[in-house]
Amino acid sequence: MNLPSDNFPIRLIIDQQHHQNLRYGENPHQTASLYVDSDVTEANVVTAAQLNPGAKELSYNNYNDADGALNLIKEFKKPAAAIIKHTNPAGCAVAKTISEAFDRAISTDPMSAFGGVVALNQQCDNHTAEKIISSFKEVVVAPSFTEEALTILRTKTNLRILSVGELKTPSVTTIEKPIIGGRLIQQRDLQVITSDDLTIVTKIEPTDSQIDSMLFAWKVVKHVKSNAIVFATGTETVGLGMGQVSRVDAVRLASLKAIEHAEGKGPENAVMASDAFMPFPDAIEAAAEVGISAVIQPGGSVNDSVVIDAANDLGIAMVFTGKRCFKHD
């Protein structure tokens, strides 16, 4: 649904075509169905071509995860790959080739990636396809697939293969969430943060490479459920902490993932992105314990000066974006 961001209608009329009944909802005891919004012109998983004939139909959860994965990789122009599990990223990376991006994304947390949804922002080739089928995946989403890649992917009988076409500029400007008794509608979070938007708040200035890595991590943390923390090195995730009611717990979860689950990488000298401000220095202290060297966060807490002092004392560079990026559902 497209609505002017500053002029919501007095009356909301929704006209969508029934597409199909789904096997079940989030759980087997819940019924579910899918409707199509014919006004949407950007790449999406609802109208995507399913290229594995005979595979079981997509479930409610498959559609939800595939949508989340596709929205994440739309953030990037260079070859990017993401693995989503239960609507949260298990890993994401940008690299010189789509195959390398997939390698770096899945190495973040291969255990959690099992049974996940893979999204690519460029054509899937045979090298990437071979890597995708090396462990169980539910769905793979990409703009297109080579014939060789399709042959390989179709060896997995129930792997759903979705071709979404060219990833054009987003056309949907609002998103909605039905709640009992009504519907919440808001402007879609399409913010783009560049180095020019950053305010360096510590005595230690981040290097150019740290800034590049922080900007990558910021794009990823937008798609992680709040409270959200992302550790990254270069343009690949190292550890993710999501869905915590305490920000310091999100840091601890990202640390655990980076230390115990990541393959061939870790948190030492990584950067950290936080989707909202840090009200206390405890999150910075927890990050410093595992070797985080730079932090990107919105700022705006009444305790910003205390957090900045802690970063200075711990030898961590920190920048403020001036904007937060909560994702609550």
Image: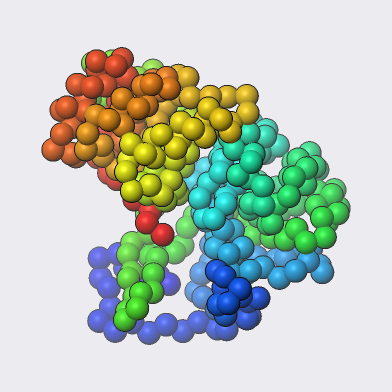
Residue for point 29% across, 16% down: 314
Report if residue 279 is visible in the image: yes
Q: Position of residue 110 (x, y in %)?
A: 64, 39
Q: Nearer the viewer, residue 175 or 286?
A: 286
Q: Is residue 234 visible?
A: no
Residue at left 19%, top 39%?
A: 300
Residue 269 higher or lower than 27, as above or below: above
The residue positioned 59% from the left and 38% from the top of the image is 109
Q: Would residue 130 appear left or right of 36 to someone viewing this image?
A: right
Q: Quadrant of the C terminus?
A: bottom left
Q: Nearer the viewer, residue 70 or 87?
A: 87
Query: In this image, 19 relative to 209: left or right?
Result: right
The vertical placement of 301 against 10, above or below, is above
Measuring from the top left, give residue 224's x and y in whole percent: 44, 48
Quadrant (top left, top right, bottom left, bottom right) of the N terminus: bottom left
Q: In the image shown, does 2 or 303 lie closer to the viewer?
A: 303
* Coloration of the structure image: rainbow
Find residue 121 and report its horizontal and vertical position in percent: 61, 47
